[in-house]
Image (cartoon, coloured by chain):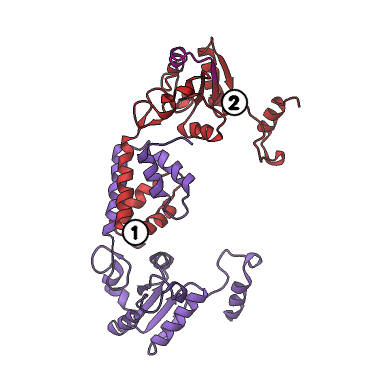
Chain colours: A red, B purple
Amino acid sequence: MIELPDSILNTVKSFSKLPGVGHKTALRQVMSMVKWSEEDLADFSSAVEQLKFVKKCDECGMYANESLCEICQTESRKEPATLCVVETISDLMAIENSKEYSGLYHVLGGVLNPLLGVGPDQLKLDRIAERVNKINIENVVLAINPSVEGDATCSYIKQLLKDVNVERIGFGVPIGGSLEFLDPLTISKALENRKRL
Amino acid sequence: MIELPDSILNTVKSFSKLPGVGHKTALRQVMSMVKWSEEDLADFSSAVEQLKFVKKCDECGMYANESLCEICQTESRKEPATLCVVETISDLMAIENSKEYSGLYHVLGGVLNPLLGVGPDQLKLDRIAERVNKINIENVVLAINPSVEGDATCSYIKQLLKDVNVERIGFGVPIGGSLEFLDPLTISKALENRKRL
C-alpha cells in the first residue's frame, strides 16, 4: 500500500479514536481536510486544544464555564424542588431538549457495575443525598436507562433517599414506534404501565 | 436549548464541516473527546495544524513529502511506460490498492465541467501531453469515472494525445454485484463489453 505523508497519517490516527469512525471514514475526512484553508485548519486545531479546559459544574456535573453551570445558577430551577438523576451529560441534554423538565439535575457519570469495579463510591452516590438535604429537594426523578445495572442503581438510590419522593421515568412504546418491531420486554413494560383513558 | 461551553461549540462547528458529519454526529464526537487525555488532545490538535504543510508531487499531483512523490521517485515505475490518469488522489489510492497497476499516475483534480467554469486550463490538461513527451509514455490509461463530464474529459485527452495508445478502463457488472439491482446503463455497458470465453 502506498505511504501517505506523516501529517495525514497522524490525523487519521487521532480521528480513528472517535466513536463510530474507522480507518476508512477517518481517511476520507482527513483527505477532505487537506483541502481546507489554513485558517479553518488553525480554528479546528485550537478548538480541539481548548477542549482540555472544559470544566464541570461542582454541583451537578454538567459542563460549565464557571464553577457552577448555567442550570445550577438559575434560581427558578430550584423552585419545583425536583432533582433529575441521569447517567451522562448527553442524557441531560436529551431531557433539556424535550422542554418538559424545569428542575435541577445530577449527572452520575455511569451506573453501578461491580464487574467493571464501579461501585457507589466511584459514582459518589452519597453526593445525591447531600444535595437533596442541602437544597431541600422533595422529588427525585431517576432518568436512568433500563438495564440490569441501571435498575440496580435505581434501587440503591431509592434506599439512600428515604425521606423524599423517588420516581423513575416511564417505560413503554416510543412515539413513532411500531408494536410489530418492538422487543418483548418493551411490550411487557408497556402493558404493565397502561393508563386508564 | 442549553448553552454548552464555547470550546465545545467551536469544535462542533469545525467538525460539522467534514463530509457526512452533521451537528448531531459532531456533538457526539466532541463530547467523547472531552473525556480524552490532555496528551491525546494535543496530538490531535497538532496533527490537524500540520495538515497545512501537506505538499503535492510536482509531477503527478499525489501527496508527497518532498517535491516528488514516492511513485514518481521509483525508477521501476517508469518501465512499462504507462500513465494512468485519475480524477482524485482517492481514485489513485483505490487503484494502488488493487495491486494491478505498476506504472505512473497523473491526478487531474477534477473533470471538465463548463457549467462550473472548469475548462482544460483549470485542469492543466496540457501537462499530460508534456509529461507523455518528457518520460516517453507509450500507453495512457484513463481511469476516469463514467459520467457526462468524465466522458468529455476522456475525449479531450484522447484528441490531445495523438501519438500514443489511449485506453479507458472497462465498465460493466462489479464483482459481487447482482444484475437484478444494477441500473440499465451499467447492464448495457456490460453487454457491450462482453468477451469471448
Q: Name the image quarter holding residue A48.
A: top left
Reading the image, the residue beneath label 1 is A34
Compute the Cα span from label 2 to label 1. 47 Å
Furthest residue in direction top, as rendered: A163
Q: Of A24 and B21, which appears nearest the observer?
A: B21
How many marks can you see? 2
Q: For the residue marked with disc 1, what is the amino acid?
A: Val
Local packing at callout 2 (Cα closer than 10 Å; few below 14, some 14-19, many 20+) is: few
Tell me, for residue A169, which label it has, or none.
Answer: 2
Residue A3, compared with residue A87, is above or below; it is below
Q: Is residue B175 left or right of residue B107?
A: right
Which chain is disc 1 placed on? A
- The numbered mark, 2 or 1, whose residue comes first in the sequence reads 1
Q: Is residue A112 left or right of residue B123?
A: right
Going 34% across and 59% down the picture, which residue do you hit?
A34
Within the magenta stretch, is there residue B177?
A: no
Q: Are marks 2 and 1 in contact (CB under 8 Å)?
A: no
Position of the N terminus of chain A by quadrant: bottom left
Residue B186 in view, yes or no: yes
Furthest residue in direction bottom, as rendered: B163
Within the magenta stretch, is there residue A131?
A: yes
- Looking at the rendered structure, whether the residues under marks 2 and 1 are on a common chain is answered as yes
Q: For the residue marked with disc 2, what is the amino acid?
A: Ile
Position of the C terminus of chain A by quadrant: top right
**Which percent across, then down, holds residue B89?**
38, 66
Which chain is disc 2 placed on? A
**Which percent across, then down, holds residue B131?**
31, 80
**Which percent across, then down, holds residue B136?**
30, 84
**Which percent across, then down, holds residue B50?**
27, 54
